[in-house]
Amino acid sequence: MAIVAIFETLISAMVAQYKFATLNTANEGLPMEFSRGKELFGLAISNLFCGLMGATPCTGVLVRTGVNIEYGATSRASQLINGFYVLLVTVFAIRAFAFLPMAVIAALLLNSSYSLGKSSIMVMIDYCKKGKWLDAGTIIVVCLICVLLDGAVGLIIGLVFRMAI
């Protein structure tokens, strides 16, 4: 589970970096790169506290990050504000959400996946233009394994493959 959390966080940060760079080309003063070390350190600290409190592990979430960037968020406070809204919904409206049909939830997830897929395709095209064929191929193979077999298996195979090369 820790490996999946790490990969989801790093993938989320890479997609965010790409989306932020493409949407905000006029904002030269804003940071467009993330530090893997800082990202993983923050994830480790947050998961340490989650473990101490008996909570599930946390990750950088692709959908939330993508939505924040598309709606113009330029500060890390956007994640905090999002967390506050999630808390409000959880406290006050969770009983209403329990009655949502699974088809509605599936439609929301499909819409989010479609939006992220557009960005992922652009990242793949960018990798191919820069001659990063190994990166592009690894992403495609891992994606296929995740969809056809199992998400964790796909990520572990991708990790082992890239560490071997």
Image (spheres, helix red, strand yellow):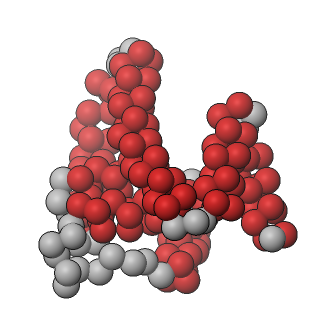
Within the image, what quadrant is residue 143 found in?
Answer: top right
Does residue 40 appear in this view?
yes
In the rendered structure, the answer to whether residue 164 lies left or right of residue 142 reads: right
> Which residue is rendered at x = 28% and y = 62% of the image?
22
Within the image, what quadrant is residue 13 found in?
Answer: bottom left
In the rendered structure, the answer to whether residue 135 lies left or right of residue 19 reads: right
Q: Position of residue 113 (x, y in %)?
A: 43, 37
> Which residue is rendered at x = 49% and y = 61% of the image?
129
Task: Say which of 77 and 84 sits in front.
Answer: 77
Q: Is residue 155 above or below residue 47?
A: above
Does residue 45 appear in this view?
no
Q: Position of residue 161 (x, y in %)?
A: 80, 61
Count all numbered tags in the image, as a single digit: 0
Q: Is residue 22 above or below residue 117?
A: below
Q: Position of residue 122 (x, y in %)?
A: 42, 51
In the rendered structure, the answer to whether residue 122 lies left or right of residue 159 reads: left
> Which residue is rendered at x = 42% and y = 15% of the image?
103
Q: Position of residue 61 (x, y in %)?
A: 44, 54
Residue placed furthest toward the right:
164
- The C terminus sits in image quarter: bottom right
Q: Is residue 148 above or below residue 12?
A: above
- The N terminus sits in image quarter: bottom right
